[in-house]
Amino acid sequence: MNIVVLIKQVPDTWSERKLSDGDKTLDRASSDAVLDEINERAVEEALKIKEAGDAEVTILTAGPDRATDAIRKALSMGADKAVHVNDEAIHGSDAIATAKVLAKAIGTVGDVDLVLAGNEATDGRSGAMAGMLGELLGWPSLTHANELTVENGTAKAKRETDEGTSDLEASLPAVVSVGEKINEPRYPSFKGIMAAKKKPVTTLGIADLGLDASEVGLAGSLVQVDSFAPRPPKSGGQKVEDEGDGGAKIAEYLVGQKLI
Amino acid sequence: MDFVETDEHRDLRAAVASVSAPYGGDYYVDHARRGAECTELWHALGDAGYVGVSVPEAYGGGGGGLVELALVCEETAAAGAPMLLLLVTHAISAAVIAEYGTEEQRKEWLPGLASGRDKVVFAITEPGAGSNTHQLATNARREGDEWVIRGEKYYISGVDEAEALLLVARTGTDARGKAQLSLFLVPTDADGLQKVPLPVDVLLPEKQFTLRFDDVRVPASALVGDENQGFRQVFHGLNPERITGAALCVGIARYALAKATRYANDREVWGRPIGTHQGVSHPLAKAKIETELAALMTQKAAWLHDRGLPAGEASNMAKYAAAEAALAACDAAMQTHGGNGVSQEFGLLPYWGLARLLRIAPVNREMVLNFVAQTTLGLPRSY
């Protein structure tokens, strides 16, 4: 089986995240960059399939030079090789333009059976990539999977969202996005770390993918950030007077927040 | 010259830090207070290949060197969970068995040391022979196919957690009256071996023991390396013990300084963070400088050792500087916390206690100064 896992290097959620004043894209210099945690779960799921049978796992990312750190982490977990689309022209791409780039890049990996991704990155939070890729590739997309089984040319997923749980099934090739609960990703082992640097990483520009600069980046995007404002400081919150019904009011609040 | 850490070492640091993070200071301090071994963390680090990072690959280890083992010691300590036994189980025992052990001994002990499921601790110190190894009295005499061991050791760490001891015993006396030493692998459940806890007032997960050997019999195959060559063989493990001890201290210092910095930024008195005041910030800055200097010397010493270059001077200097830096950092961190500096809630005292212990062990400050005075500076020998 030929599996591609999409990964993304994102600003560490613990650091301050900012947009740049100039073109209103992510200010990457202002914060530490890490492999998005949800991607580690996607990698883990691919490695479990590999360990249960026979699969080659290719990591795919579009990002600047320093995305090599995120690629190396995925390779140190146990993936076999990587494709890094690194081209200044991609800077500022919206979700659709990014999906175009990734779809073309998946085409360079050969006959792919399964594309795995996280359901939503912690920075852009569009949560749309798996759906868009499925559309562009003409493959089914199973999103928000918290359980996945792949056998006999079929992918079965348990999709869990706020609306409820559904059981999905699709024939391969397919795109699957995974949720937080699908697994606990492994730590890279020392041997994995030492082996990672020796694994092949193919670096491609958009010309290698048959794309023109006008199709990607800020110019090729339907969505651009027009203006932005920092999140207002925390307000005092909501005060509830306890008139003997405090417990019920707390429960009501928690239900409203979908916490219970 | 290149001071940029390799990608592999950066990744190793990050991975060890992320394995250790879910345990961290609260876990360690809780275990230190109860004198309970940190098995869960040890196993988690073992499963990911970090406990056995320096064990040869052929026996299930990572095939790394002392540079990597020191990074593991530093990062676990910087996460708040210093793993003191790594100094003996891996810096000494695993290295000595890998270097001088027979193929059978390697096969028996290295895989378990690599996975972190077995421990072999180190027994050298005696009531009558501390820093002066030539005076060791515990002896082993050959009787047919067996060695028979008699004597006493003390301040032996982690005996209750270990499957075996790497024991240093006298097997002869040379013409000048100095001990001829040999190394033995002795199971901790051997008949005739009495293990008496030696209480200390430092809060530690690891326990100390007095060991009495009352005609403990081990087979001839328990001898590690060559008979009467123990002194030279032990020295193969002593620099690594100092280097990993230094790395542990660097980690402790980083942990204490991180806690102190957070507190000094958050805690406000008279309307501004206490870190504004130089009386608070300067001791922390000073400790930070000393920590970074100690870290550099520790890395240099590990690098020299891994290349087979003389590492005695650098190991001693690193051990000295790192213990002093860790003590200064813990002391400044406690002072920064005011009354909270000795509270159980902030849990700083166990690190001070460990740092204080590491000014004495594995080699005390004064013996390091003797070494530098005599060997580096060429001053007259003091003892």
Image (spheres, rainbow, N blue to C red):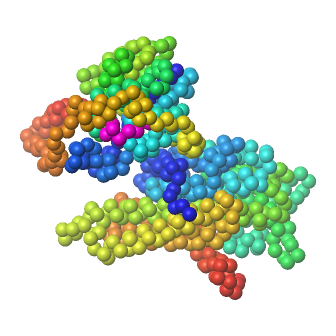
Front-lying residue, A66 or A195: A66
Quadrant where the C terminus of chain B sits is bottom right
Q: In the picture shown, does residue B202 fall above or below A173?
A: below
Would residue A13 be counted in the magenta stretch?
no
Query: Image check: A192 left or right of A98?
Result: right
| Point 61% across, 65% down: residue | B301
Front-lying residue, B360 or B233: B233
Q: In the picture shown, does residue A192 fall above or below B251?
A: above
| Point 74% across, 44% down: residue | B108
Q: In the picture shown, does residue A132 fall above or below A22?
A: above
**Residue B233 visible (yes or no):** yes
**Residue B327 visible (yes or no):** no
Give the residues drawn in magenta, as a range.
Answer: A84-91
* Quadrant housing residue B223: bottom right
Would residue A86 be counted in the magenta stretch?
yes
* Quadrant housing residue A41: top left
Place of residue A134 in the rendered image (x, y in percent of width and height, measured from the top left): 35, 20
* Quadrant housing residue A135: top left
| Point 38% across, 70% down: residue | B284
Query: Image check: B153 left or right of A3?
Result: right
Place of residue A255 in the rendered image (x, y in percent of width and height, measured from the top left): 19, 31
Quadrant where the N terminus of chain B sits is bottom right
Place of residue B109 in the rendered image (x, y in percent of width and height, measured from the top left): 71, 46
| Point 66% across, 67% down: residue | B311
Place of residue A130 in the rendered image (x, y in percent of width and height, measured from the top left): 34, 25
